[in-house]
Image (cartoon, grey):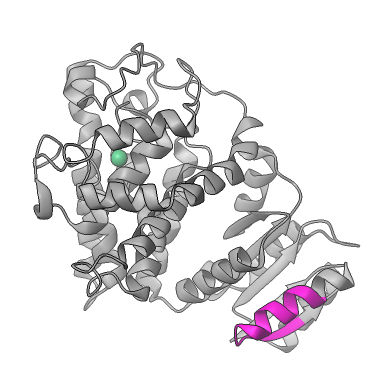
Amino acid sequence: MNVLVVDDDAAQRRLVTWLLEEQGYDVITAGDGLEAIDRLRQSPSALVVCDWDLPGISGVEVCRMLRGEHSPQDLCFIMVTARHSQRDRRTAFAAGVDQYMIKPVGPAELAAQVEIGRFVVTRTPEERRILAMARVAESRDPCTGSHLKRIRSYCRVLADQLRTVPDLGDVVDEDYVKLVYVASPLHDIGKMAIPGDVLLKPGKVNQKEFEILKAHTLQGAATLDTALDRLDDSPLLRMARDIAISHHERYDGSGYPHGLAGDEIPLCGRIAALADVYDALTSRRIYRRALRHEEARAIIVNGAGTAFAPYVVQAFLDREDDFQTIGRQYSEVDRLAVDLPAVAYGHEISGRLLRGTELGHLHSTGVVV
Ligand SMILES: [Fe+2]
């Protein structure tokens, strides 16, 4: 598969080219935006890795122009830039950028994103349509920041670590890790069906509203079931469906929507549950600061066997350095984000994971903390 690398810095171009060729990709390059357009017309590529600031037209303009010629399904556009404001990110995504990476980008990280891009562009049109919906859902909820990007990275780390668990080794293989990375951002897709006055209510929600919010799990599953009905099969959408419906279940059976316990909860749901809660704890809210990793760690550990599967907690502990790295990677982006009206929670972190019904409202990520 061809990859077009666009950067006006020749050394950077060579470096990225070398890296991707090592991964087995055929690489073509361009030093500015117009050359990129020409190169792509001569040698169609499904993947583009592009800098933002280029001589002549910018990387964002390149993306807009390409989107005019290619449907999003035909092309994966990865923006690699030093620009890190939320405004820039929104501009890039509005132009049709699929992945937004902030420099400096490590070789392994870039290789992983290109590989994910390849994975996505080789999906069926129906699968790609559903994946695009995750971005729409994210844009509807201004409180999420980089939540989806962290969630998928946390899920990938956990799944990768679970490959070492003897009982899970047969289930969690390389493809599973890739699937959970791509599918997990769809976990809250059901929020698209939640009325805006409830989803974004600037105050404590009542019990009735909380029940409506909880239904995002069932709504998400229904959306994905509809898509699955149109396909012979899709491991990706099946996993997305399982995550959507089960990421608020708790290991001890006290979660929702079905009160599943233990292994009744799909493994991907057990993984996403921990990732979702960790991200909620370590994210700033209007009523509290972001918890430090050590504080979130203590709460997660305390939830082993109640909120979370013990072996998923162990995987988290085994890879907590990766969690901190991922958190730091996106914290700068979110630090610069403007606070927007959010659900007001009005309660204290008590050092334990409280049940949603105890609190009577839902976290913006769908997790009650
Ligand atoms: Fe949720």
Residue for point 34% across, 28% down: 363
Q: Main secondary structure of the magenta part?
A: helix
Image coordinates of residue 304 in percent, x first then y, are: 22, 40
Q: Quadrant of the C terminus?
A: top left
78 up-or-down from 261: above or below: below
**Residue 114 location (% of width, % of height):** 58, 71
Viewer-closest of 345 and 271 = 271
Query: Is residue 245 depicted above or below 197 in this figure?
Result: below
**Splitting the image into 4 quarters, where does residue 129 fall?**
bottom left
Magenta includes 21? yes
Residue at figure coordinates x 32%, y 25% from the top left: 198
Residue at image point 35% right, 74% down: 175
Tell me the magenta residue range: 14-28
- Residue 218 on the magenta segment: no
Q: Give the camera-side residue of 208 and 68.
A: 208
Q: Please state which of residues 188 and 12 is positioned toward the viewer in this rendering.
A: 12
Image vertical order of residue 259 relative to residue 62, above or below:
above
Residue 282 visible in the shown view = no
Left or right side of 171 for 13: right
Look at the image and tell me whether residue 63 can be seen. Answer: yes
Residue drawn at x 44%, y 47% is 320
Q: Where does residue 9 sit, x and y in percent of width and height?
A: 88, 67
Quadrant of image for the N terminus:
bottom right
Q: Quadrant of ligand 1?
A: top left
Q: Position of residue 77 (x, y in %)?
A: 62, 66
Task: Judge left or right: residue 143 versus residue 175.
Answer: right
Determine which quarter of the picture holds residue 333. Answer: top right
